[in-house]
Image (spheres, rainbow, N blue to C red):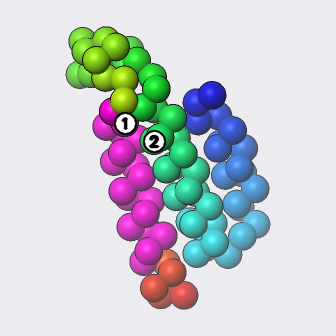
Amino acid sequence: TGVYPQIFQNRESIALPLDAALTAVAAAAEAGKDASKAMIAQFGRAKTLGAACIGFPDAGALSITIILDTMRDYANEVA
């Protein structure tokens, strides 16, 4: 569980063209964001929520997903 399998997938993206690599990385970020919904926050502002944060994505994971989705969309538009 968790985001670790996606890290290895991203290593394979190095040899891809930029638009394809960003598509793969954005998909991995989405999977990591979804995986974070099952995790109890141990750090940051959400740590005080305990089990109440289950079912909600980690804020950082959500932020990086938005950033990578935007990068992917731009690269696909330009390519």
Residue drawn at point x = 64 percent, y = 34 percent: 4
2 and 1 marks in contact (CB < 8 Å): yes
Q: Quadrant of residue 68?
A: bottom left
Q: Tell me which segment is drawn in magenta.
A: 56-74
**Amino acid type, label 1:** Pro
Helix, strand or loop at mark 1: loop
Return the x and y of residue 11 as percentages of the image width and height. Answer: 72, 51
Up-down: is 5 above or below 65? above
What secondary structure characterizes most of the magenta part?
helix
Up-down: is 16 above or below 58? below
Left or right of 11 in this view: 43: left
Residue drawn at point x = 63 percent, y = 28 percent: 1
Q: Which residue is mark 1?
A: 57
**Which numbered tag is attached to residue 38?**
none
Upstream in the sequence, badge 2 or badge 1?
2
Return the x and y of residue 77 as percentages of the image width and height. Answer: 45, 85
**Which numbered tag is attached to residue 33?**
2
Membership of 63 in magenta stretch: yes
Helix, strand or loop at mark 2: helix
Up-down: is 33 above or below 18? above
* Disc 1 residue crowd, few under 14, some 14–19, many 20+, Cα 10 Å: some
Return the x and y of residue 24 as percentages of the image width and height. Answer: 62, 61
Q: Quadrant of residue 46?
A: top left
